[in-house]
Image (cartoon, helix red, strand yellow):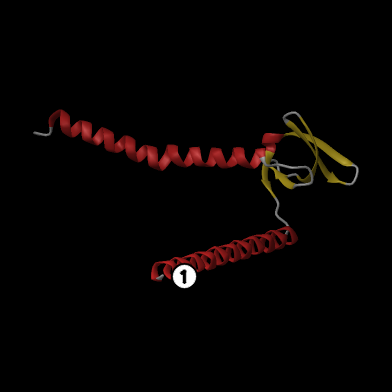
Amino acid sequence: MGQGMGGSLMWLVAFLAITYFLIIRPQQKQKKQREQLLNSLEKGDKVVTIGGFHGKIVAFKGDNIVLELAPQIRIKANRSAVGYVVVDEDDEKKSNKKKKKDKNEEQDNDVDATEQEVTLQENDAEDVEK
Protein backbone atom coordinates (compact mmCIF):
# COMPACT_ATOMS: atom_id res chain seq x y z
CA MET A 1 0.00 0.00 0.00
CA GLY A 2 3.03 2.23 0.21
CA GLN A 3 3.30 2.77 -3.58
CA GLY A 4 1.31 5.96 -3.53
CA MET A 5 1.34 8.44 -6.37
CA GLY A 6 4.75 7.43 -7.81
CA GLY A 7 3.69 3.83 -8.42
CA SER A 8 0.45 4.87 -10.08
CA LEU A 9 2.26 7.32 -12.31
CA MET A 10 4.76 4.62 -13.32
CA TRP A 11 1.92 2.27 -14.34
CA LEU A 12 0.21 5.03 -16.31
CA VAL A 13 3.42 5.83 -18.22
CA ALA A 14 4.03 2.13 -18.91
CA PHE A 15 0.45 1.71 -20.18
CA LEU A 16 0.78 4.74 -22.48
CA ALA A 17 4.12 3.50 -23.85
CA ILE A 18 2.70 0.04 -24.58
CA THR A 19 -0.35 1.57 -26.24
CA TYR A 20 1.85 3.76 -28.42
CA PHE A 21 4.15 0.98 -29.59
CA LEU A 22 1.44 -1.67 -30.09
CA ILE A 23 -1.40 0.40 -31.51
CA ILE A 24 -0.60 3.95 -32.59
CA ARG A 25 2.80 3.43 -34.24
CA PRO A 26 1.74 0.47 -36.44
CA GLN A 27 -1.33 2.42 -37.59
CA GLN A 28 0.84 5.38 -38.56
CA LYS A 29 3.15 3.07 -40.49
CA GLN A 30 0.21 1.48 -42.36
CA LYS A 31 -1.22 4.90 -43.17
CA LYS A 32 2.13 6.05 -44.58
CA GLN A 33 2.44 2.90 -46.73
CA ARG A 34 -1.10 3.39 -48.02
CA GLU A 35 -0.40 7.01 -48.95
CA GLN A 36 2.76 5.93 -50.78
CA LEU A 37 0.78 3.27 -52.66
CA LEU A 38 -1.92 5.73 -53.74
CA ASN A 39 0.62 8.39 -54.73
CA SER A 40 2.66 5.92 -56.79
CA LEU A 41 -0.25 4.80 -58.97
CA GLU A 42 0.47 5.19 -62.68
CA LYS A 43 -1.42 4.78 -65.89
CA GLY A 44 -1.27 1.13 -66.94
CA ASP A 45 -1.01 -0.29 -63.40
CA LYS A 46 -3.16 -3.34 -62.76
CA VAL A 47 -5.05 -2.92 -59.50
CA VAL A 48 -7.71 -4.51 -57.35
CA THR A 49 -10.19 -2.22 -55.66
CA ILE A 50 -11.43 -2.66 -52.11
CA GLY A 51 -14.71 -3.79 -53.69
CA GLY A 52 -12.95 -6.60 -55.55
CA PHE A 53 -12.87 -5.17 -59.09
CA HIS A 54 -9.78 -6.12 -61.07
CA GLY A 55 -8.75 -3.61 -63.71
CA LYS A 56 -6.10 -1.52 -65.37
CA ILE A 57 -5.78 2.21 -64.76
CA VAL A 58 -6.40 4.06 -68.03
CA ALA A 59 -6.80 7.64 -66.79
CA PHE A 60 -6.70 9.96 -63.80
CA LYS A 61 -9.28 12.67 -63.22
CA GLY A 62 -8.52 14.57 -60.04
CA ASP A 63 -9.02 12.23 -57.10
CA ASN A 64 -10.70 9.69 -59.38
CA ILE A 65 -9.26 6.98 -61.58
CA VAL A 66 -10.76 5.32 -64.63
CA LEU A 67 -10.38 1.54 -64.59
CA GLU A 68 -10.74 -0.69 -67.59
CA LEU A 69 -12.23 -3.95 -66.37
CA ALA A 70 -12.51 -5.51 -69.82
CA PRO A 71 -12.25 -4.14 -73.35
CA GLN A 72 -14.73 -1.25 -73.68
CA ILE A 73 -15.87 -1.61 -70.05
CA ARG A 74 -14.66 1.24 -67.90
CA ILE A 75 -15.61 2.47 -64.47
CA LYS A 76 -14.74 5.57 -62.51
CA ALA A 77 -13.64 5.08 -58.90
CA ASN A 78 -12.03 7.10 -56.15
CA ARG A 79 -8.28 6.77 -55.96
CA SER A 80 -8.72 5.67 -52.35
CA ALA A 81 -10.78 2.68 -53.56
CA VAL A 82 -7.59 0.96 -54.76
CA GLY A 83 -6.83 -1.94 -52.46
CA TYR A 84 -3.51 -3.01 -53.93
CA VAL A 85 -1.47 -3.08 -57.11
CA VAL A 86 -1.18 -6.44 -58.87
CA VAL A 87 2.40 -7.37 -59.71
CA ASP A 88 2.73 -9.61 -62.77
CA GLU A 89 5.44 -12.27 -62.74
CA ASP A 90 6.95 -10.70 -65.88
CA ASP A 91 7.09 -7.28 -64.22
CA GLU A 92 8.62 -8.81 -61.10
CA LYS A 93 11.29 -10.60 -63.16
CA LYS A 94 12.14 -7.37 -64.99
CA SER A 95 12.35 -5.53 -61.69
CA ASN A 96 14.62 -8.20 -60.18
CA LYS A 97 16.90 -8.11 -63.24
CA LYS A 98 17.16 -4.33 -62.99
CA LYS A 99 17.97 -4.55 -59.27
CA LYS A 100 20.68 -7.14 -59.95
CA LYS A 101 22.12 -4.99 -62.73
CA ASP A 102 22.17 -1.91 -60.48
CA LYS A 103 23.80 -3.92 -57.69
CA ASN A 104 26.49 -5.23 -60.06
CA GLU A 105 27.20 -1.68 -61.28
CA GLU A 106 27.54 -0.50 -57.67
CA GLN A 107 29.96 -3.34 -56.94
CA ASP A 108 32.00 -2.47 -60.05
CA ASN A 109 32.14 1.17 -58.92
CA ASP A 110 33.25 0.06 -55.44
CA VAL A 111 36.00 -2.12 -56.94
CA ASP A 112 37.20 0.78 -59.13
CA ALA A 113 37.27 3.11 -56.12
CA THR A 114 39.20 0.52 -54.08
CA GLU A 115 41.74 0.06 -56.89
CA GLN A 116 42.21 3.83 -57.07
CA GLU A 117 42.77 4.00 -53.32
CA VAL A 118 45.37 1.20 -53.47
CA THR A 119 47.18 2.98 -56.32
CA LEU A 120 47.19 6.23 -54.35
CA GLN A 121 48.51 4.46 -51.27
CA GLU A 122 51.28 2.83 -53.33
CA ASN A 123 52.21 6.21 -54.79
CA ASP A 124 52.26 7.75 -51.30
CA ALA A 125 54.48 4.92 -50.05
CA GLU A 126 56.90 5.47 -52.95
CA ASP A 127 56.99 9.23 -52.21
CA VAL A 128 57.80 8.54 -48.55
CA GLU A 129 60.64 6.18 -49.49
CA LYS A 130 62.24 8.85 -51.71
Q: Residue at x 73, y 58 (%)?
A: 91
Dot 1: element: helix
Residue 34, given in percent of the width and then of the height, sits at: 60, 40
Is residue 102 positioned above or below 81 on the image? below
Relative depth, front residue between 91 and 13 = 91
Which of the two residues, 115 or 29, is positioned nearer the viewer here? 115
Seen at 59% across and 61% down, the residue is: 106
Quarter of image, res 77: top right
Badge 1, how many Cα within 10 Å: few under 14, some, many 20+?
Answer: few
- Looking at the image, residue 119 sits to the left or right of residue 54; the answer is left
Residue that badge 1 annotates: 122
Q: Residue at x 43, y 39 (%)?
A: 23
- Give the quarter of the image for residue 63: top right
Residue 115 percent coordinates (x, y): 53, 68
Q: Percent position (x, y) of residue 57?
A: 78, 42
> Visible in this render: residue 50?
no
| Quadrant where the C terminus is found in the figure | bottom left
Identify the residue at the far front of this view: 130
The residue positioned 68% from the left and 60% from the top of the image is 98
**Along the horizontal axis of the image, is 24 left or right of 83?**
left
Task: Count all numbered tags in the image, as a single digit.
Answer: 1
- Residue 111 in sight here: yes
The quadrant the N terminus occupies is: top left
Tell which of 76 and 126 is nearer to you. 126
x and y, in percent, of residue 41 in the image: 71, 42
Q: Is residue 16 above or below residue 123?
A: above
Left or right of residue 85: residue 74: right
Which residue is most to the right? 72
Work out whether residue 126 or residue 60 is closer to the camera in this orientation and state it. Answer: 126
Residue kind at label 1, given as amino acid type: Glu
In this rendering, the answer to whether 33 lies above or below 93 is above
